[in-house]
Amino acid sequence: MRVADLLVGGPARSAWLALCSGPCLRAGRSQLYPPDDLWKELLSNAEFQVKSELYKDDLSLAKNILCYANEHQPLFQYRVNMSTNIGDCTLPLTFQFIQYCPTGTKGWMLDFLVQGRVTSVREVSEFPGLPQ
């Protein structure tokens, strides 16, 4: 049975991975999935292998992530291009995702590229728009 994702759409998933994924990655108990749902139709999550490099601070956000599908074919890549330190934590300022998909033959091709940029960092008391 397939379960609907709580983070709907690529932008929400991209922002979560870039700015909120630290506790899950640090605990090592969660499976990462590509930002786009196309993988659900083409691959099972048992076929994924993930390698990640985290910043060594309290947030432990991802610096680089490489997710492989069968035979070590990159399925998606995430990397921080520019970061900044705020207090004792490192935050990405610019980052990118690259996702690949099968061509229907033995090859793979670029599915999409996302480039993100943090434009503001500030303290808030509520998080509007998050699922309850």
Image: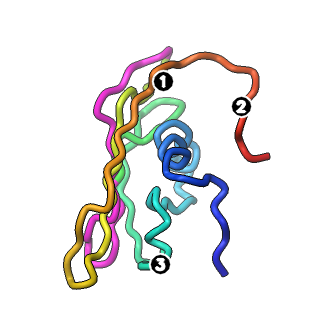
Question: Closer to us: mark 1 or mark 3?
Answer: 3
Task: Tell me the kind of residue under disc 3.
Answer: Glu
Residue at image coords 20%, 83%? 106
In this rendering, is residue 131 above or below 70? above
Write down the region rendered in magenta.
Answer: 66-87
According to the picture, the residue beneath numbered tag 2 turns out to be: 127
According to the picture, the residue beneath numbered tag 1 turns out to be: 89
Depth order, front residue of 85/100: 100
Residue at image coords 55%, 45%? 12
Q: Is residue 124 magenta?
A: no
The secondary structure that most of the magenta stretch takes on is strand
Q: CA distance from mark 2 to mark 3?
A: 32 Å
Task: Tell me the kind of residue under disc 2.
Answer: Phe
Residue at the right extreme, as displayed = 132
According to the picture, the residue beneath numbered tag 3 turns out to be: 41
Query: Quarter of the image containing the N terminus?
Result: bottom right
